[in-house]
Each structure stands twice: as C-alpha cells, then as structure tokens.
Amino acid sequence: MTLADCEAVATVRVRGWQSAYAGLMPQAHLDAMDIAEDAAVRRRRLTSRNGVVNVVAERPGAGVVGWAALGPYREEGRRLARGELYAIYVLPEQTGTGVGRALMTEALARATAAGHPDLALWVLKENAPARRFYERAGFHADGAEEPYDVDGVAVPEVRYVRALCASDQ
C-alpha cells in the first residue's frame, strides 16, 4: 500500500463495513462513515511507521479492490510475539471472487515471514459469513470474547487464531 492508495483503501473499508455490518451495528453509524475522513486516517497511519503491514489487492481496470492490515498483537497497550490481522476487507461486489482468499494468503505469508508463531483476529460474534471465511482459512475461535460498543449498542467480538509455520509461505 502506498499513500496514493489511501483513498481507494478508505473506499474499500467504508463500503466493506457498510455491507458486512448492515444489521449487526447501528445503521446510522454505518451511514455516517466518511471516505475522505477515513482516507486521512489511512494516510496518518501509513506514515507513522507503527509496524503495521498494509497490503492491497488490485484488479486490472478496477484498481484497488481489497485491503488487509496486520502486525503485532495488541493487548492492554503491549505488543506481543503473536501476530494480529487488524483488518481484511474487499469491495462488496468482489465478495466471492477470490480477492479475500488472495489477501489472506498474503497476510499469512507476511505474518510467517515476520516470525509470528500464530495469527489472531477479532470478528463480530454475529458475523457468520466472516466467521465461515476465517474457518475455511484455518482459523478457529479460541473462546476469548470482548465487548465492543458502537453508538451505545453492544456488538461483541470473538477471537480467532491460527498457528503459523514455514509451510504457510
């Protein structure tokens, strides 16, 4: 991902949230998401040298159609050896086309190359399609749950984990 990709990545993220989380979090929150504001956040984070790896998926003629971000696992302000997949989104019209699988393959390879023993992620408990996607990629729920609040509405998350090994590259 480059600075020139930030607007496209923001579009992927915002449209991805609006599609994937419809009915799972307040619609007013989803409707209020702003691509320009999100692009500014992407730019700040990309230039902060915070150890986050951002990967984009592109299609000829369509440009950026997917995005993933990963780095060290964050727990109570500490970074651990475990890796964390912070985000993976594709444009809604790209769902089911292999873009998400390609991003996951690249994320697993990057996490393995970085020396992480495993990769964790958090997913909304009620997001059945995303949970199936992660399970097909070899992740499993490890029993950890966290509350997540969106505009006063509880949308709990569950943690998924996958062990990494050299053969994941």
Image (spheres, rainbow, N blue to C red):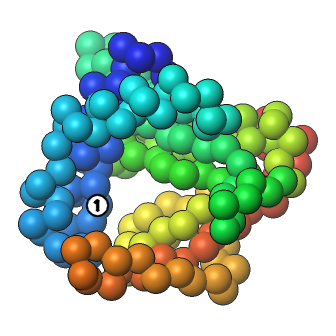
- Residue at 47 percent across and 47 percent down: it is 88
* Residue 166 appears anywhere in the view: yes
Q: Nearer the viewer, residue 132 or 113?
A: 113
Instruction: Name the residue that disc number 1 marks.
Output: 20
Q: Report the amino acid beneath label 1.
A: Ala
**Residue 85 drawn above or below residue 132:** above
Does 71 sit left or right of 118 as displayed? left
- Residue 13, given in percent of the width and then of the height, sits at 32, 44
Q: Quadrant of residue 17?
A: bottom left
- Residue 60, given in percent of the width and then of the height, sits at 34, 14
- Residue at 36 percent across and 14 percent down: it is 4
Does 145 sit left or right of 43 as displayed? right
Q: Nearer the viewer, residue 79 or 63?
A: 79
Q: Secondary structure at mark 1?
A: helix
Does 65 sit left or right of 71 as displayed? left
**Residue 154 drawn above or below residue 44:** below
- Residue 87, given in percent of the width and then of the height, sits at 48, 49
- Residue 51, given in percent of the width and then of the height, sits at 67, 35
- Residue at 57 percent across and 83 percent down: it is 145
Q: Nearer the viewer, residue 36 or 118?
A: 36
Q: Nearer the viewer, residue 46 or 24?
A: 46
Disc tally is 1
- Residue at 26 percent across and 13 percent down: it is 61
Mark 1 residue crowding within 10 angstroms, few (<14) / some (14–19) / many (20+): some
Quarter of the rendering occupied by the C terminus: top right
Does 2 sit left or right of 79 as displayed? left
